[in-house]
Image (cartoon, coloured by chain):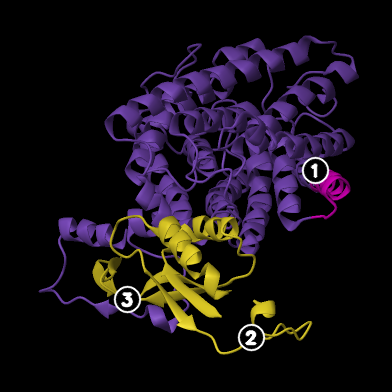
Amino acid sequence: MKLVTAVIKPHKVEEVKAALRTAGITGMTVHEVKGVGRQGGHAEVYRGTEYKVDLLPKVRFEVLVGPEAVEEVVDAIVAAAATGKIGDGKVWVTEVESVVRIRTGERDLEAV
Amino acid sequence: MEIDAGDTAWVLTSTALVLFMTPGLALFYGGMVRAKNILSMLMQNLFAMGLMAVLWVLIGYTIAFGGTNNFVGNLDFVGFKDVGMGVMEGLTIPVILFAAFQMTFAIITPALITGATADRFRFGAYAVFIAAWLLIVYSPVAHWVWGGGWIFDMGALDFAGGAVVHINAGAAALALVIVMGKRKGWPREGMHPHSLPLTVIGTGILWFGWAGFNAGSALAANGLAAQALLNTFIAASAAMLGWVFVEWARDGKPTTLGAASGAVAGLVAITPCAGFVATLPAMIIGVVAGVICLLAIGLKTRFGYDDALDVVGVHLVGGLTGALLLGLFADTAINEAGADGLFFGGGFELLGKQAVASFAVLAFSFVVTILIAKAIDATLGLRVDEEAEDIGLDLAEHAEVGYSFSELSSMDRLGHAERLGHDDHADRLEEVR
């Protein structure tokens, strides 16, 4: 099994969710996170003083998939999350040793 | 007549009460938008308390209340010239108090429109819009109805602003969202209220302030003011029940947002009627408005106009409901200066006048608002670009965020040497996108 993790722009959540559903993925975990990368940050101004905010809001998706679906899922996320502008985020894939579905006790591929 | 201390005290109080409704409205709307747009909503409403008040003193008041021409006021009171401490003709309060009380109405009426245009109105364009709208639409309509203009002469009734405030703002909201277009993603994407507790606090402030709006419109501390106050409160209560029970039966759950919306719908509908009807009719007007406004908010999805927070469904439809029901329930036993409606022996005469006045205000406000909106769109642009809509108006338009709970958002302060110029700031925002 593989874990596909993606960090994307918050306003792309709906489109990525829809793309994953189209790719046959029914389960996912989504976190609101903050991060910094090449995008840098933005400025906020309070009573004339300007502050640099470098940790920007992002959304992190985690999706467990079987090995055969990895490419399709990664491509779907990339296509849905892309705006072409700096700060679109990243997708990465990691190996997963084992998975258990809590309700049934099913293991590994059956539990994905 | 001489100045009466009791009357003056009550209208002073009412002026403060009505002023407080605008920050209440800001919270009522602010809770319903997404968290990234809360400040833009609060700011638009707060800013109206600045800009509308200044314009009212300089020129709005005289357009509304200078002379008794049929259509528009004269320039006798520019800059509050001759608006002094002496007694107002026909009343027992100072002229300047009447003008101040009316100023609070001129602040909240354009502010009502912000609910429709939420999440996409460029702030600069908003400021120009409400300034133009106050002087070209609101002040003349106030003149027609309250300043001795043609609706006043015709004998249509509007105790506290069913037509002047609610039909007027609701029609403008409809016109503006038609020119401006939908929010990005509407209606496909869920755009849930981010904080209904704020909306409930706002509802409470509006309900409280509406005592000044309606009972203050008696312009005296007397029995009629008390009747108007009670009518206002009972209509809100009945409307809340009407809205909640119907949605409960139809959708399966009684909702907090439904209760808040229902109460406001009742307050809107009773506004023209408050000082012309008896208690039980006020209750009937409330419950009818609660149900009709609930049904009316479905119109936007049917017709595809993005009235984000239902200004059309609640204010235009609620205002029309109240103005027309007044043609049925008006009762000279309550107010001799009023008229008798259909159910009190007055025949169809008042109902006809109410319909003419309501639809005239609706049509005037709608058409002129379309023209103002088109002119602003062609020059400044009415709405923000898509990226600004994505990151939210708070950051894109105001360089602030509404909520900063997390330690992770702690910020480096930029020193003077590093202080960014305006253009650099725009570049930084550009990077975010």
Image side of residue B131 versus residue B379, left or right = right
Badge 2 is on which residue?
A: A99
Q: Which label belongs to residue B239?
A: 1
| Chain for disc number 1 | B
Q: Are marks 1 and 2 in contact (CB under 8 Å)?
A: no
Q: Which label belongs to residue A36?
A: 3
* Colour of chain A in the image: yellow
Q: Name the amino acid type tagged 3.
A: Val
Magenta highlight range:
B240-254
* Colour of chain B in the image: purple
Q: How many residues crowd mark 1 within 10 Å: few (<14), some (14–19), many (20+)?
A: many
Image side of residue B134 versus residue B192, left or right = left
Q: How many residues crowd mark 2 within 10 Å: few (<14), some (14–19), many (20+)?
A: some
Q: Which secondary structure, mark 2?
A: loop
Q: Is residue B199 above or below residue B357?
A: below
Q: Does residue B219 appear anywhere in the picture? A: no
Looking at this view, is A13 or B58 the one in front?
A13
Q: Nearer the viewer, mark 1 or mark 3?
A: 3
Q: Which secondary structure, mark 1?
A: helix
Which quarter of the picture shows residue B63? Answer: top left
